[in-house]
Image (cartoon, helix red, strand yellow):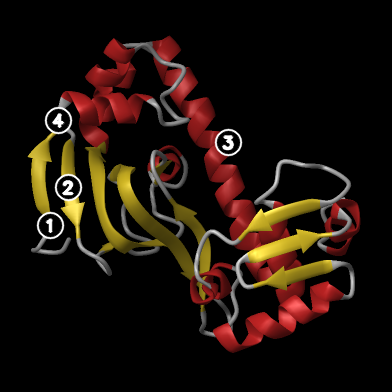
Amino acid sequence: MSSKSASRLLSDDDLALVCKSPTFVELPEEDVERLMAGASARTMPRHTLLFSQGDAADRFYVVLEGKVKLFTAMESGDEGVVEIVEPVHTFAEAAMFASGRFPVNAEVVESSVLVQVSAEPFFRELSQNTVLAFKIMAAMSRRHRRLLRQISDLKLKSPGQRLGSFLLSLTEKLEGRAQVKLPFDKTLIASHVGMKPESLSRAMARLRDIGVICERRNVDINDINALRIFCGEE
């Protein structure tokens, strides 16, 4: 943990934001408050490494402000960004229930405010409420499976397929045409899909053959189904 991080107890506003997270949104506020007992809000500077792949999963985080990237090392030695976590989402919690080890690395992308929740008091509260425990475990299990699938995709899919899958994730439409806006700069997107920045334009050119046109940060997808088939997601 960076020595520059500043820590404080959760305020009422912090707790209200935590309650909006997909992990906790279906729970009564009083249950979330008990689960957050002992948690702290920390201001983290850019480039803070929160944990490394293989470390003991003894905590998880909620992003209140800023962005955190989850990444893994590719076989080529390059960095593959698995996910960019934005407000108000949790990350690293599913590893506590699964292997007990973090499956990825986590680094702060821009100055962020994070809620850090220690595993011990969190599990202690869950042990006293079986119904609550099953709800939390179900939400975390879904997220963990999705994360592992994304890691697998980084290794098995071609650069063009990985870029196409990323673009598909930006729209809720299942067919027809779609227009999406790139949420990050192209350097970060290149890392996210497991390639070097200079390779991104070549991957985008490959997608142009199936009707995907990129103008700066605006992307037109002419046929969502065609892109889905190309990416192996049909």
Q: Amino acid at mark 4?
A: Gly
Q: Amino acid at mark 2?
A: Arg
* In front of the other: 73 or 41: 41
Label 3 or label 2, whichever lies nearer to me, is 2
Q: Quadrant of residue 223?
A: bottom right
Q: Amino acid at mark 1?
A: Ser
Label 3 or label 1, whichever lies nearer to me, is 1
Q: Residue at x 28, y 45 (%)?
A: 58
Above or below for 28 versus 181? above
Ranked by sequence position, the earlier of labels 3 and 1 is 1
The residue tagged with tag 4: helix, strand or loop? loop
Answer few, some or many: residues within 10 Å of disc 1's Cα (few below 14, many 20 plus, some between 14 and 19): some
List the residue tagged with mark 2: 42
The residue tagged with tag 1: helix, strand or loop? loop
**Are circles 2 and 1 on residues that touch, CB within 8 Å?**
yes
Q: Position of residue 153 (x, y in %)?
A: 68, 62
- Going by the picture, which residue comes out furthest to the bottom? 198
**Are circles 4 and 3 on residues that touch, CB within 8 Å?**
no
Q: How much space separates mark 3 and mark 2, taking CA atoms? A: 27 Å
Q: How much space separates mark 2 and mark 1, taking CA atoms? A: 6 Å
Q: How much space separates mark 4 and mark 2, taking CA atoms? A: 13 Å
User: What label does residue 142 carry, if any?
Assistant: 3
Q: Residue at x 39, y 52 (%)?
A: 101
Q: Residue at x 66, y 60 (%)?
A: 166
Above or below for 174 versus 82? above
* In front of the other: 85 or 176: 176
